[in-house]
Amino acid sequence: MGEQNDTGNKRRFKAVIDGQSYTIVGNKTEAHMQAVTELMNQQLDQLKKLAPSMTKQEAATLLAFNAISDQLDKAAELDQLKQSQTPADN
């Protein structure tokens, strides 16, 4: 978000998430992709500790659900911030 989607700036990034290797193509920096990978692995490890019998698919679904929930919360916060900065109509 906030970065321009320029197809000329696409990068390939190799990530290992929950023991599985992925090649991710995007325009984010390597530092950003590494931070996302580390955070995903931390959250997956937490889920495994809380519910050891959870399958990889269940953990991935729960992680995605939590990420979308957080995204919606941040979007609502941004909307409120924008509204509070808009001058009131007189």
Image (spheres, rainbow, N blue to C red):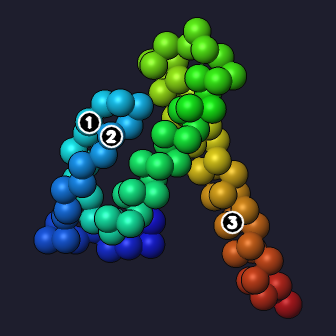
Q: Is residue 85 above or below residue 67?
A: below
Q: Alpha-carbon distance for marks 2 and 3? A: 35 Å
Q: Residue at x 82, y 85 (%)?
A: 88
Regarding mark 3 in the picture, which secondary structure is present there? helix
Q: Residues within 10 Å of mark 3 (few under 14, many from 20)?
A: few
Q: Quadrant of the C terminus?
A: bottom right
Regarding mark 2 in the picture, which secondary structure is present there? strand
Q: Alpha-carbon distance for marks 2 and 1? A: 4 Å
Residue at numbered disc 2: 16
Residue at numbered disc 3: 79
Q: Is residue 67 visible?
A: yes
Residue 32 in the image, given as x and y percentages of width and height: 41, 63
Q: Residue furthest top?
A: 53
Q: Residue at x 54, y 32 (%)?
A: 44
Q: Locate residue 48 relative to residue 30 in the image: left or right.
A: right
Residue at numbered disc 1: 21
Name the quadrant containing residue 46: top right
- Three-letter code for the amino acid on which mark 3 is drawn: Asp
Q: Residues within 10 Å of mark 1 (few under 14, many from 20)?
A: few
State which tag comes first along the sequence, 1 or 3: 1
Q: Is residue 33 above or below residue 5?
A: above
Name the quadrant containing residue 52: top right
| For the residues bearing labels 2 and 1, Cβ distance under 8 angstroms | yes
Residue 70 in the image, given as x and y percentages of width and height: 64, 47
Q: Alpha-carbon distance for marks 1 and 3? A: 37 Å
